[in-house]
Image (cartoon, helix red, strand yellow):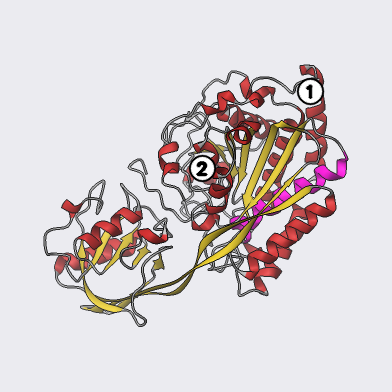
């Protein structure tokens, strides 16, 4: 994931204003005719696209994972087979389909163990950070030194008292800067490892962001375990056994890109979802759900035999779980003209979480949480989705552009963006349980980045709602882009920062 993505999400960008796609309704067709064509196609796609049919794609992804070591991670046989399945379906349907290959650093966890040796022996669950340095096989034993807690714990050299961390494992609270910065600062103070504990409920699954950035073995634990360990350290010496090992090697993987043969390329409507899973599980919700939903709508669009006024382009990204690598690579290789041709980008990542919330990306920052607004046109995309959900009686909330999914690179270059997701490791509130159903105090997806993210980890009602959102957006924007320039009243949805989506959390902002 490019470091620029974090910067790009802190303020609105203006590049999109140069795009002819945002300037007017579809050229060559009167506004009313374009609106009617859009409404007709949107209704047809919503009626025809179903969670039941999309679930058949999820079954295929599960079968692929079962036959390929239990996962569909980028660079693995599981992902290759998933990409081939999507490719074949789209080519048979009549799309112009291509593989978009790129190199990346493949990772696979080999060991993640943390045990207190003294004074009170116990095992603590820990998750290795992606791109971490590795301990020797068998791990190391060392004393723990806790970093004082403040808004930017472990981010600056001053947080590490001179000599206090040499040869020890640094215990650091999450927040205020990236995991890469925390472990680098700890390494600079002489620490031989880093344990970062969450600043909210739930497990901590993170990434250093780049193989070159890894300095010392680093893993994440829960807030509860971190606070308990910190309390023990305050009483006296705590010695732990610590093993974090990760395979890292260069591999090639491929995005799948499909577009309608016709349609004006100067007004390209683009939608995407990541197809890869983490190596810990099959990734059926994260993000088989978005991938299957997108595939279902694409196939139903082809069956209509309609010729959209605007070109529709679908993307199934690879290596999202390693830092948005596939979408970053794709956007980076676009020429200036190609960027201007993309009228908007819609992202669908985790759309069937079992304890779901219905979240819509906050294009205008009306909720005032986290990152700033998206590029010009993003507020209109949010409104289009919200209006559809309102008409169908589906409650919803905003969620921040945290930069944790594949909209990030598009926002970075000024392309209006939006989409939906249903929650990851974030905890559902009492108010959300009343609004959406489900269980308060429990993660939206308790199997996030875990082996249990399988076919049983899907809420079909949420899946169906979000497939309808995709279908309605495709039908609307296929013929009519006029809504992208219509004035939008800023209205808070009382949303929050949400949980971003499938990506391991690299970007920690002070606002989190």
**Residue 507 sits above or below residue 169 on the image:** above
Based on the picture, tell me whether residue 199 belongs to the magenta stretch: no
Q: Mark 2 or mark 1, which is nearer the start of the sequence?
A: 1
With respect to residue 426, does 485 lie above or below? above
Residue 28 on image: x %, y %: 79, 20
Q: Residue at x 74, y 40 (%)?
A: 471
Secondary element under disc 1, as helix, strand or loop, is: helix
Residue 19 is left or right of residue 198, and the answer is: right
4 lies above or below 86: above
Q: Which mark is residue 488?
A: none
Does the magenta portion include 285? yes
Q: Alpha-carbon neighbours of circle 1 within 10 Å: few (<14), some, or many (≥20)? A: many
The image position of residue 207, as x and y in percent, is 42, 58
Tell me the tag on residue 34. 1
**How many numbered marks appear?**
2
Question: What distance separates the C-alpha of mark 1 from that of mark 2?
Answer: 30 Å
Residue sitting at x 25%, y 52%: 153
Q: Position of residue 185 (x, y in %)?
A: 24, 56
At 29% from the left and 55% from the top, the residue drawn is 182
Q: Is residue 433 left or right of residue 155?
A: right
For residue 19, which quarter of the picture? Answer: top right
Q: Is residue 459 visible?
A: no
Mark 2 burial class by Cα count in 10 Å: few <14, some 14-19, many 20+ = many
Task: Identify the residue under disc 2.
Answer: 408
Asked which secondary structure carries label 2, the reply is: helix
Q: Are marks 1 and 2 in contact (CB under 8 Å)?
A: no
Q: Which residues are magenta?
A: 284-305
- Where residue 10 appears, as percent x and y from the top left, is 41, 35
User: Is most of the magenta stretch helix, strand or loop?
Assistant: helix
Q: Nearer the viewer, residue 290 or 465?
A: 290
- In front: 29, or 103? 103
């Amino acid at each position: 994931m490019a470091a620029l993505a974090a910067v790009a999400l802190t303020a609105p960008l203006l590049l999109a204003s140069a795009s002819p796609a945002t300037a007017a309704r579809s050229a060559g067709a009167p506004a009313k005719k374009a609106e009617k064509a859009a409404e007709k196609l949107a209704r047809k796609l919503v009626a025809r696209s179903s969670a039941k049919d999309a679930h058949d794609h999820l079954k295929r992804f599960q079968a692929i994972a079962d036959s390929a070591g239990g996962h569909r991670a980028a660079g693995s046989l599981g992902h290759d087979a998933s990409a081939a399945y999507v490719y074949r379906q789209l080519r048979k349907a009549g799309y112009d389909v291509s593989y978009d290959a790129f190199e990346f650093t493949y990772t696979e966890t080999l060991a993640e163990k943390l045990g207190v040796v003294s004074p009170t022996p116990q095992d603590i669950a820990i998750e290795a950070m992606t791109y971490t340095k590795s301990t020797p096989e068998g791990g190391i034993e060392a004393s723990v030194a806790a970093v004082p807690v403040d808004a930017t714990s472990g981010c600056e050299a001053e947080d590490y008292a001179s000599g206090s961390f040499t040869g020890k494992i640094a215990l650091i609270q999450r927040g205020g800067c990236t995991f890469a910065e925390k472990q680098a600062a700890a390494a600079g103070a002489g620490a031989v490892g880093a344990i970062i504990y969450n600043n909210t409920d739930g497990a901590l699954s993170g990434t250093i962001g780049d193989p070159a950035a890894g300095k010392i073995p680093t893993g994440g634990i829960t807030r509860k375990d971190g606070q308990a360990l910190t309390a023990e350290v305050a009483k006296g010496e705590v010695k732990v056994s610590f093993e974090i090992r990760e395979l890292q090697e260069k591999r090639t993987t491929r995005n799948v890109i499909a577009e309608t043969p016709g349609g004006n390329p100067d007004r390209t409507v683009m939608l995407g979802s990541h197809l890869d899973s983490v190596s810990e599980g099959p990734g059926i919700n994260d993000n088989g759900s978005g991938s299957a939903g997108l595939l279902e709508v694409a196939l139903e669009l082809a069956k209509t035999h309609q010729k959209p006024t605007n070109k529709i382009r679908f993307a199934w990204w690879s290596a999202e779980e390693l830092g948005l690598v596939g979408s970053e690579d794709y956007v980076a290789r676009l020429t200036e003209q190609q960027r201007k041709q993309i009228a908007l980008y819609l992202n669908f990542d985790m759309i069937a979480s079992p304890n779901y919330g219905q979240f819509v990306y906050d294009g205008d920052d009306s909720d005032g949480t986290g990152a700033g607004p998206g590029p010009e046109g993003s507020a209109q995309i949010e409104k289009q989705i919200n209006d559809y959900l309102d008409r169908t009686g589906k409650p919803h909330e905003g969620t921040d552009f945290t930069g944790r999914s594949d909209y990030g690179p598009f926002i970075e270059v000024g392309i209006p963006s939006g989409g939906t997701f249903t929650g990851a490791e974030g905890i559902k509130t009492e108010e959300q349980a009343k609004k959406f159903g489900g269980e308060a105090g429990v993660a939206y997806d308790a199997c996030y980045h875990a082996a249990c993210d399988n076919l049983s980890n899907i809420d079909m009602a949420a899946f169906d709602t979000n497939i309808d959102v995709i279908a309605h957006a495709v039908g609307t924007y296929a013929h009519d882009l006029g809504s992208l320039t219509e004035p939008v009243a800023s209205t808070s949805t009382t949303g929050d920062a949400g949980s971003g989506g499938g990506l391991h959390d690299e970007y920690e902002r002070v606002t989190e």
